[in-house]
Image: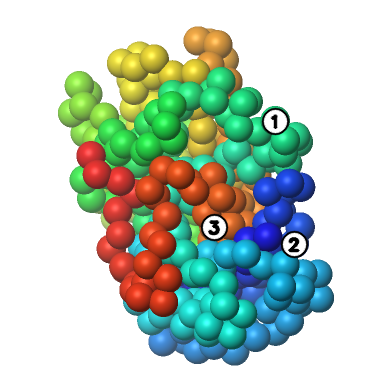
Amino acid sequence: MILALESSCDETAVAVFDPATGLTGEWIHSQIALHEAYGGVVPDLASREHLAHFGPLLQRALATVKPEQVTKIAVTNGPGLAACLAMGLAAAKSLGLAWRVPVVGVNHLRAHAFSPFIALHAANPAAFDGEFAKLLPHLGLLVSGGNTALFSLDESRRITLLASTMDDAAGEALDKGAKLLGLGYPGGPLVEKLAASGNPTAFAFPKAVAQRSTLEFSFSGLKTSLRYQLEKMAPEEIERRKADLCASYQAAVFEALVRKSQLALERGVYRSFGLSGGVANNQTLQTRLAQATQQINVPFFRAQPKHTGDNAGMIAFAAWAERETGGVNEAGLSLEIAPSLPLAMG
């Protein structure tokens, strides 16, 4: 059994994973309501919440698994907010000492990379390694509030970064767009909700693409374009056309994501495509990428909704899936936080 802890930002999470059966339990405490009043995550408040809620969550986990059944404790050691990461690491080391169980550090971004395959493992744990091997090499798109990246996963489960954003992440661009439009926090889901009833071609926003020949992303110009558009409109017109603004702005973000993914698929030979990260919950993005991959007969995998945000389930799964790749930090009690830990070297 693997006990996993996640506290990279504003979610306190615990999970238990059994390689023979899959995730046997997942528990999470969300801080969205707390930070909503501030329009974003306040690190000091977030770390205080982790301190208050790890204990209760662990008590719930220990109602389903005994300490002597735990053979490994996996904890997110980066990237993330330093104070928040430290809370999870302290809890993991304390349990490791008390139970005499090894502690391993998991890269939060790499856990996202493997998250689309959690459901595949759950469907048939005994056959997972063989089925997964048939899907490699794999092309993945990670889209969250803090990261936008295209990466490959080779036959040895090694991750190679192919491209990232040169400025804002896609999720960050959506959140900033929501703020300009006077929406709440978190902004991405609110933009999606309004966009559902809007016209995606109503406003000609730039398609958030860097150089067309490269895989790199760029979204800062799109945000600036939205601001200029809003400055030209009266408040009542903005309110009346808010759905169209959201739909057009979201379409520009997704056009970049889909176009760059297609370009990467054209340049390599991949047996599967995966979508992960918080923005992966957006149904419009899911549909567009599913259509793009279907056209070239590449299987499409996406993380389940409960595994798209910050969660301990993907941390536990990655600790097992990367057991022989070198992607897990086995420093044990010497493990340190790494707030700027990259997905992989390009």
Residues packed near mark 2 inside 10 Å, few (<14), some (14 to 19) or many (20 plus): some
Q: Is residue 238 above or below residue 267?
A: below
Q: Is residue 327 above or below residue 98?
A: above
- Looking at this rendering, what residue extends furthest in the top direction? 296
- Between 200 and 65, the one nearer to me in the picture: 65
| Residue under numbered circle 3 | 315
- Between 233 and 105, the one nearer to me in the picture: 105
**Residue drawn where x is 72% and y is 35% of the image:** 126
* Type of amino acid under label 2: Gly
* Type of amino acid under label 1: Ala
Mark 3 or 1: the one toward you: 1
Q: Which mark is residue 87?
A: none
Q: Is residue 303 above or below residue 278?
A: above
* Type of amino acid under label 3: Ile
Number of labelled discs?
Answer: 3
| Residue under numbered circle 1 | 127
